[in-house]
Image: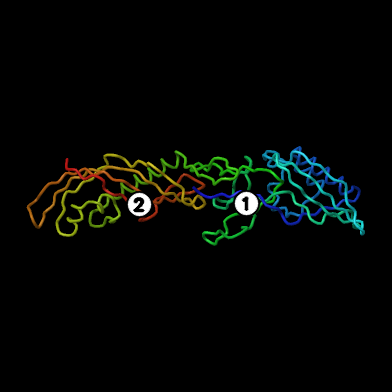
Amino acid sequence: MVAAVLLVVGISTISGASVSQTPSQKLTAYFDALISGDAEAAIEAINPDVPEAHRLLLTNEIYGKSKDRLNSYKMAEPVVDEFGDETIAVKLVEGGMENQQTYSAKKTDEGWVFDSFSPGTIVNVTADFGDVIEVNGVKVDLSGLDFAAPSAETNNPSYFELPAFTGRYGIKVPDTGMYTSETYFRDDLEIVPTAKLTLAVETAYTEYLDECIATDTSTRSDACPNWVNSADLRQFKDNDVVTGQTWSVSEAPKVAEIAMTDPKTGTVTFDGSLALDYSTSYVSQYSNDSPVAKHEEYTMSGHVSFSLDGDAVAIDEGSPQAHSSTFDEN
């Protein structure tokens, strides 16, 4: 499971100016637009002080699909102070819950300007899945953003802050072909490996195993499952002369469980099983030439790196591990 946090907090300041309309009229147009799901009309009513690169969620396509938006509002009469500035209290009902807000506006030569104005929320989107993530079913490119804050665990930046109008936003990892996720609103994102990734891992491990079997005993890596886990063969290597050794795969590698450890860079861990048969002859310091035929079953595990943009899967060097669970003579 990989964390993807969705938080709702206030944004510091958003300002807007009006020449021909009063603050109450501007707020009415703004809230009416939010109730109808029209983000563009809300921005036209009161333009948020948010950089263009950060307005990724302030769109009709995304906001219109959000849940628990503004349901209704009730605006009090403006309170005018000695300088002519206005303060307006508004009772908002958002997702069935009441929320009291107060808005202040000053009259300038350019029109009315709100001292502080919030579009409602900040959506904190995890940065663990690459540059693209889906929000309310719409793909959002995060490549132009800066990280928001360091991770508590690693002290490295791990998420982006995206200003948004009040509502609940569904976050989902796009289907890369290798993995996807369900849509979550507040919980952690659970990354789901696809059947394609499972098959790719099995294929990569089979190729790794084939290379182990094809390599001469004297140069074979000790990490190869057809060497390192066999007590007899380790003894051969240290003390005896091995001849005529042959291996075959009787049960191809099969992945039982697979988990994403780093979707951004393309890394998974896996567990599974395989079975090997071998026959050999050896000259032992304790006996004469002795033929041996064995069947071994293994549990396997390891780390696999893969490409997020393609189908290529490559097992990290030295990471596969296979442990013999049976060792039976045929």
Name the residue carrying label 2. 320
What is the basis of the colouring in this image? rainbow
Q: Residue at x 78, y 47 (%)?
A: 43
**Is residue 315 or residue 98 the one in the foreground?**
98
Where residue 311 appears, as percent x and y from the top left, is 46, 44
Q: Are marks 2 and 1 in contact (CB under 8 Å)?
A: no
Q: Residue at x 9, y 58 (%)?
A: 285
Secondary element at tag 1: strand
Residue 184, picture quadrant: top right
Quarter placement of the C terminus: top left
Name the residue carrying label 1. 124
Q: Is residue 295 above or below residue 103?
A: above
Query: Looking at the picture, which amino acid does disc 1 mark?
Result: Asn
Where residue 194 appears, as percent x and y from the top left, is 47, 40
**Is residue 153 or residue 216 the one in the foreground?**
153
Q: Seen from this angle, which residue lies furthest left?
A: 288
Where residue 42 appears, as percent x and y from the top left, is 78, 44
| In front: label 2 or label 1 | 1
**Is residue 143 or residue 59 the one in the foreground?**
59
Q: Earlier in the sequence, mark 2 or mark 1?
A: 1
Where residue 33 appears, as percent x and y from the top left, is 78, 41
Q: Residue at x 21, y 43 (%)?
A: 295
Secondary element at tag 2: loop
Query: Looking at the picture, which amino acid does disc 2 mark?
Result: Pro
Q: Is residue 43 left or right of residue 68?
A: right
